[in-house]
Image: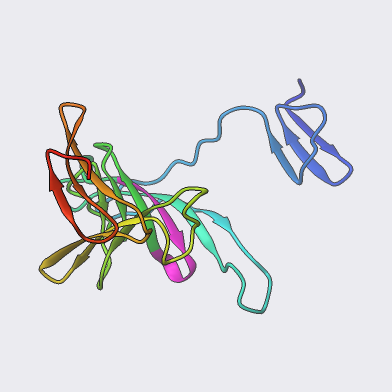
Amino acid sequence: HGDLDISGGNLGIGTDNPEYKLDLNGDLRIPQSYAANGESSRIWFTNNYEGNGFGNTSINYVGGESGNEQNGSRLRISTAGKTEALSIRRDGNVGIGTHSPSRNFSIYAASYPTLQIANSETGTGANNGFEIQQGGNSTNIINREAGNMDFYTSNAMRMRINSGGNVGIGTTN
């Protein structure tokens, strides 16, 4: 393959036949001058639509806080206005709505952070599926469907709350 090829208005690096405006066959390295809380160059995804479009989003690397630069570093995916939507820390912890997830997977929102699990039978709307939600000091476990909630230990069902609200312990009905 050629090192650099300009063909039909497309730029190819490591390819003889670029099919896109920029077609890269190989690794891409974006170095940064490192500093605490320093941000690397970004990969920007922009939308030139003047209405209520997707807006500008970006991906970049961010150094950790002073004194914890390496361990606190993270990959950041931001939405319009540089709002950090997703962080993946060097230790593998993933955060949605937080840049410092303290667990393997952390979700933060100012009001009612919610994890929704849905499938093709339940639908994908706000009132479908199963949710775990944190509201103030209370935790909500919500089955939005007219079905049972079953609780298992040692691969056996130990408790069921049926759709009518009745609770069975050690029984399926």
**Left/right of residue 161 with respect to residue 33 in the rendered view:** left
Q: Nearer the viewer, residue 10 or 149?
A: 149
Residue 16, given in percent of the width and then of the height, sits at: 81, 27
Q: Which residue does the image show at 47% across and 51% down from the upper left? A: 59
Residue 72, given in percent of the width and then of the height, sits at: 22, 46
Q: Which residue does the image show at 25% across and 51% down from the upper left? A: 106
Q: Does residue 132 appear in this view?
A: yes
**Left/right of residue 159 with respect to residue 120 in the rendered view:** left
Find residue 56 and report its image quarter.
bottom right
Residue 152, given in percent of the width and then of the height, sits at: 19, 36
- Residue sticking out furthest to the front: 173
Q: Which residue does the image show at 37% across and 59% down from the upper left? A: 146
In magenta, the rendered stretch is 74-83
**Left/right of residue 19 with respect to residue 142 in the rendered view:** right
| Magenta stretch: includes residue 92 | no
Q: How is the image coloured?
A: rainbow
Quarter in which the N terminus is drawn: top right
- Residue sticking out furthest to the right: 8
Q: Does residue 67 appear in this view?
A: no
| Magenta stretch: includes residue 82 | yes
Using the image, determine if residue 29 lies above or below residue 50.
Answer: above
- Residue sticking out furthest to the top: 1
